[in-house]
Amino acid sequence: NPDESAVCAAMVNSPTLSFSRIENGNLKEVKRYQEAAPEFSEDGEAFSSNSRRAFSRPVGYGDKVYVLYSGQPLKGSDDGYPPYECKHLIEYAWDGNPVRHFVLSEPISAFCIEGDMLFALSNYPETRILQYSLNHKRRN
């Protein structure tokens, strides 16, 4: 966060989102969101097709942190878009409490925020840069 007193981390290959405070040079977790644990394939070498992606790419902006949420099976969505593309963007306060939930009209894989604008990258079905206002109205 801006005053370097808090951290938000999305765990790689685990459907977990963690919010921590920095106290005396140490991290102290204050809130954790965890979906069901990932399932492994029968041979144990890869994630099962029943496993789901959850949180990814937290971006801090001022007194808020924005996180993509997929919730899709690793095999992809019923809409055909890949599991790393997300239609859900969740705004949290730095204490880990959710503030707003945006359901985007198109799936995105990365984003940044400037002022009240969300600039997003979509890789499916083609690579595009999208622009939304934070009140969820898509612009060109």
Image (spheres, rainbow, N blue to C red):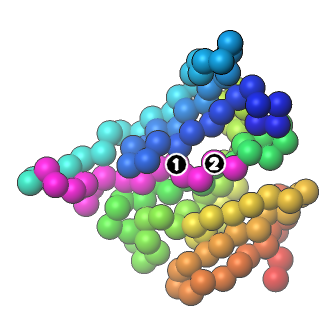
Quadrant of the frame with the C terminus: bottom right
Q: Which residues are magenta?
A: 44-59
Q: Residue 47: percent from the left, percent from the top?
A: 25, 54
Quadrant of the frame with the N terminus: top right
Q: Which residue is mark 1?
A: 55
Q: Tell me which corner region of the image, top left, top right, bottom left or bottom right, holds residue 94.
A: top right
For label 2, the SS is: strand
Label 2 or label 1, whichever lies nearer to me, is 2
Check residue 45 for magenta coloring.
yes
Q: Residue furthest right?
A: 115
In-front residue for pair 104/118: 118
Q: Tell me which corner region of the image, top left, top right, bottom left or bottom right, holds residue 132.
A: bottom right
Q: Residue 26: percent from the left, percent from the top?
A: 60, 18
Q: What residue is drawn where x is 66% and y is 82%? A: 128
Q: Tell me which corner region of the image, top left, top right, bottom left or bottom right, holds residue 64.
A: top right
For label 1, the SS is: strand
Name above or below for residue 87 compared with residue 6.
Answer: below
Q: What residue is drawn where x is 42% and y is 39%? A: 35
Q: Residue 46: percent from the left, percent from the top?
A: 21, 56
Q: What residue is drawn where x is 70% and y is 69%? A: 120
Residue 131 placement, left or right of 101: right
Q: Residue 7: percent from the left, percent from the top?
A: 65, 33
Q: Which residue is mark 2?
A: 58
Helix, strand or loop for the magenta stretch, by majority:
loop
